[in-house]
């Protein structure tokens, strides 16, 4: 647990109930922290044992406004945290293990703490699903990516591989044709799972080709991606395929396991939103990728954090009337 900002949140002195507890410390959570702190709500931020969200694993961010030369992901998120720490709030660098949103005030438990809150903002994010093969993690940021819209710009006139067969894979492939010289979609079956409209668009695009019945066994390269090792599932034969980029597009996993049974989630585990950032539980709000299946950008997550903070402030004000 961090020793910074260890002052207790200001709430009812008899019950020590925080006005707002923010779960998550990526762009969404930290923006919510800045806004709620400046509104004198004295928030508590449960940042997680790995604070910062996906930006911590991002090398260069060139699409976040205000940084004309780009900025490293870890530096960007650290700047956000430093900005939040200027105000009256508390950080707990632990994971949430359980919540109780059925009883008021809400209860949020970490490994060592039990917090009470009038409102909660959930900003735990979502992470790309990875293949779990050799060199994948080592070459992330060096040609391997889980976000085409984030990194596509770096692959101008380069040949790339997209792994997957659903809408996400084809959306990524189509987006990458703006930059890449050729996009090869590798799919383990001979038919795609994507919607027909996405398939029609992909098949009609001359820059996109398909490698059927195949899986990626390994990603090749020392300091940067030079290719992939493919295995044909029908013949069992392996071969090397040259490329300069690998985009893994097999889906995302929202960090919502601790919310099951407490709040409405969709079939993929994302938080269901109602009227902006509101959730199925009054007084609980969501922000960022944990409820966003479409954009998944740092800037859109930060905007969500702002909206959730304002919604929480207005909710608290309405309860005082």
Image (cartoon, grey):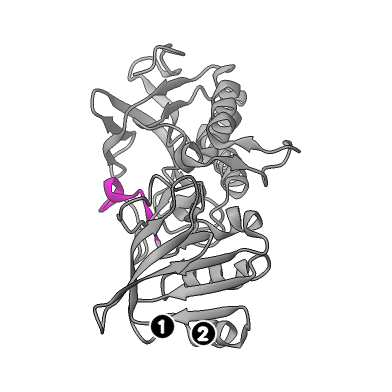
The answer to which quarter of the image holds residue 188 is: bottom left
Query: Given contact means CB atoms under 8 Å apart, are the residues at marks 2 and 1 in contact?
Result: yes
Q: Alpha carbon of mark 2 to alpha carbon of mark 1: how far?
A: 8 Å
Q: Residue 151: give x, y in percent of width and height.
A: 59, 54
Position of 276 with respect to 130 (left or right) is: right
Residue topped by disc 2: 199
Q: Quadrant of residue 75?
A: top right
Give above or below for 91 relative to 258.
above
Residue at horizontal 51 percent and vertical 47 percent from the top:
142
Asked if the magenta segment contains residue 258, the reply would be yes
User: 70 or 168: which is nearer to us?
Assistant: 70
- The answer to whether residue 12 is magenta is no
Report the span colored magenta: 252-262
- Disc sitting over residue 6 in the figure: none
The residue labelled by disc 1 is: 192
Q: Residues within 10 Å of mark 1 (few under 14, many from 20)?
A: some
In this rendered view, identify the residue nearer to me: 65 or 227.
227
Counting residues from the N terminus, which is met first, the one under dot 2 or under dot 1?
1
Q: Is residue 95 above or below residue 148?
A: above
Residue 202 appears in view: yes
* Mark 1: secondary structure: loop
Which residue lies at the image location 49% right of the left edge and 67% below the top edge? 161
């Amino acid at each position: 647990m961090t020793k910074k900002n260890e002052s207790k949140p200001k709430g009812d002195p008899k019950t020590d109930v925080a006005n707002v507890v923010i779960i998550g410390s990526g762009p969404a959570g930290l923006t919510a922290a800045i806004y709620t702190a400046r509104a004198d709500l004295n928030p508590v931020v449960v940042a997680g044992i790995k604070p910062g969200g996906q930006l911590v694993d991002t090398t260069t961010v060139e699409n976040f406004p205000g940084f004309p030369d780009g900025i490293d992901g870890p530096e960007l998120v650290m700047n956000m945290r430093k900005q939040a720490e200027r105000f009256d709030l508390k950080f707990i660098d632990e994971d949430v293990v359980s919540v109780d949103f059925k009883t008021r005030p809400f209860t949020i438990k970490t490994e060592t703490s039990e917090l009470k809150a009038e409102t909660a903002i959930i900003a735990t994010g979502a992470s790309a699903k990875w293949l779990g093969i050799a060199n994948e993690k080592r070459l992330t940021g060096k040609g391997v990516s889980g976000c085409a819209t984030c990194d596509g710009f770096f692959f101008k006139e380069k040949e790339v591989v997209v792994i997957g067969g659903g809408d996400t894979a084809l959306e990524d492939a189509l987006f990458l044709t703006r930059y890449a010289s050729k996009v090869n979609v590798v799919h383990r079956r001979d038919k795609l799972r994507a919607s027909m409209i996405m398939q029609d668009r992909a098949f009609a695009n001359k820059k996109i080709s398909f490698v059927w019945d195949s899986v990626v066994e390994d990603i090749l390269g020392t300091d940067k991606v030079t290719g992939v090792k493919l295995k044909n599932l029908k013949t069992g034969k392996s071969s090397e395929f040259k490329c300069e980029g690998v985009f893994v597009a097999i889906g995302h996993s929202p960090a919502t396991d601790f919310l099951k049974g407490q709040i409405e989630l969709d079939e993929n585990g994302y938080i269901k939103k109602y009227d902006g950032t509101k959730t199925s539980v009054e007084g609980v709000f969501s922000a960022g990728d944990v409820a966003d299946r479409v954009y998944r950008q740092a800037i859109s997550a930060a905007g969500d954090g702002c909206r959730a903070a304002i919604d929480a402030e207005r909710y608290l004000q309405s309860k005082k009337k």
